[in-house]
Amino acid sequence: MKPRLLTTALLSALTLATSSAFAGEALDRIEQNQEIRVGVTGDYMPFSEKLSDGSYVGIEHDLAAVIAERLGVKLTLVPTSWPTLMEDFQAGKYDIGMSGISVTDARKEYAYFSNSYYNYGKTPITRCEDVEKFDSLAKIDQPDTTVIINEGGTNAIFARANLKQAKLHVEPTNKYVYDRILDGTVDLMIPDSVEADYRARHHDELCRSMPGFEFTESTIATMMPKDDELKARINAALSELEQNGQLDKIIDKNMGIKI
């Protein structure tokens, strides 16, 4: 069973559809333009990754295609980054954000989120040979340990809040952090468990050093303007995917699990 939280999506969608607090401005703009612009980072599998040919793959891209289809509009992917995610959103460079975005209080000040479709926590991943060296936060937080972080996301926030002695190696993008672990530049990373599971599944040399344990509890959802009608429509689309089993299939496919 996958760690998801979408059981109340249909009820929430029906409730929001009757609300008029933020009624339809973003949705009206999307329908008028006949286009929904989705902000993507392209560096965070299994949710979003940009391939060498310029195309994108991941859970969020499959979900974005469904949302665009349900709204009857064209899907346009707009590149953004974790450091500029909220700046680009507030500047109106994209309509909704979908790259495995965590629901946080800080982001909720400026945005609505759909019902969550994945829950997870921070957990360390390292070379399999070093699992015992890093099987607790106390062992990780040592002066001779180097932890890699990607700037702008919750990984960096967690590391800076909880690691007082370990050295932090900053990468500008999430795309190459696992290369730095594999080549020995750094010792480990403390990413979301869904990403750690994905990377361990695709790299035999990488293992979660604390399997089954997560330091935090968080959820992933679609980020959007404060528009009740748009939120209701997106929640309804996600609810339909859950009820007909397609959400499970999308997640399994992008995690590399055979269906």
Image (cartoon, rainbow, N blue to C red):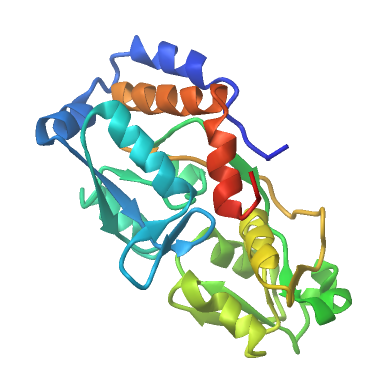
| x and y percentages locating residue 52 in the rendered image | 36, 73
Q: Residue furthest left?
A: 32
Residue 243, located in which quarter of the rendered image?
top right
| x and y percentages locating residue 142 in the rendered image | 78, 82
Q: Nearer the viewer, residue 192 or 199?
A: 199
Residue 64, located in which quarter of the rendered image?
top left
Q: Quadrant of the N terminus?
A: top right
Q: Nearer the viewer, residue 244 or 33?
A: 244
| x and y percentages locating residue 26 in the rendered image | 22, 32
Q: Nearer the viewer, residue 165 or 133?
A: 133
- Residue at x 75%, y 54% (from the top left corner): 214
Q: Is residue 249 above or below residue 140?
A: above
Q: Nearer the viewer, residue 189 or 252?
A: 252
Q: Is residue 213 above or below residue 251?
A: below
- Residue at x 85%, y 69% (from the top left corner): 135
Taking the image as drawn, is residue 228 in sight? yes
Q: Is residue 8 above or below residue 148?
A: above
| x and y percentages locating residue 4 in the rendered image | 63, 36
Q: Quadrant of the C terminus?
A: top right
Q: Residue furthest front?
A: 259
- Residue at x 76%, y 69% (from the top left corner): 207
Residue 192, located in which quarter of the rendered image?
bottom right
Taking the image as drawn, is residue 109 in sight? no
Q: In the picture provided, is 252 more to the left or to the right than 39?
A: right
